[in-house]
Image (tube, grey):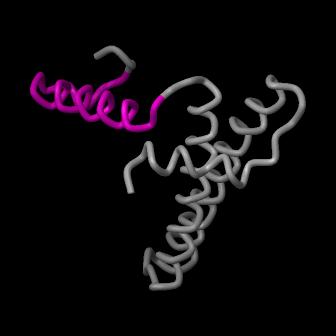
Amino acid sequence: MTFDEYQKQAPSTLISHPDPLMDKTIMVLGISGEASEIAEKWKKIVAYREGKITPDDIEEMAKEIGDVLWYLSNFATMLGISMDDVAKTNAAKLASRKARGALKGSGDNR
């Protein structure tokens, strides 16, 4: 499945809000919330289990990563952005940074 194929499927489980601004806001907050769940699970693995990752941890992380993907995909759709294009553009940006020795550092336009 490509990102664009997933993106076409994702809205089938979306419960839309009548206000388009609220719809987009819910997606952005969902991205943040689900990413925070990943961070919390990782914190517990590192802090309480010395970084030992179980198969159950991997399964739970995959679910949370999927949730982030769902919110990202729906948000991109709301903005008229192709997820395949996002992936291609990001890969090209990172390849350019690597070629220029600019993977480390800060700033979006390095």
What is the x, y in percent for residue 87?
35, 37
Q: Residue furthest bottom?
A: 55
Taking the magenta stretch, the answer to whether it contains residue 89 is yes
Q: Up-down: is 54 above or below 110?
A: below
Q: Nearer the viewer, residue 80 or 25?
A: 80
Query: Who is closer to the viewer here, 8 or 98?
Result: 8
* Residue 23 picture location, percent across and down: 79, 33
Q: Quadrant of residue 38?
A: bottom right
Q: Position of residue 52 (x, y in %)?
A: 43, 80
Query: Along the line of sight, which residue is nearer the eye, 56 or 81?
Result: 81
In reply to whether residue 68 is colored magenta, the answer given is no
Overall secondary structure of the magenta section: helix
- What residue range appears in magenta? 82-106
Q: Quadrant of the C terminus?
A: top left
Residue 13 lies in quadrant? bottom right
Q: Position of residue 73 (x, y in %)?
A: 56, 42
Q: Residue at x 87, y 36 (%)?
A: 17
The quarter of the rendered structure image containing the N terminus is bottom left
Q: Residue at x 58, y 57 (%)?
A: 39
Q: Is residue 43 above or below residue 106?
A: below
Tell me the residue at 20%/26% (across/down): 97
Q: Residue at x 53, y 73 (%)?
A: 45
Left or right placement of residue 87 versus residue 75 in this view = left
Residue pushed farthest right? 18
What is the tally of numbered marks visible in this picture?
A: 0
Q: Is residue 75 above or below residue 40?
A: above
Q: In the figure, is residue 95 to the left or right of 75? A: left
Q: Residue furthest left?
A: 99
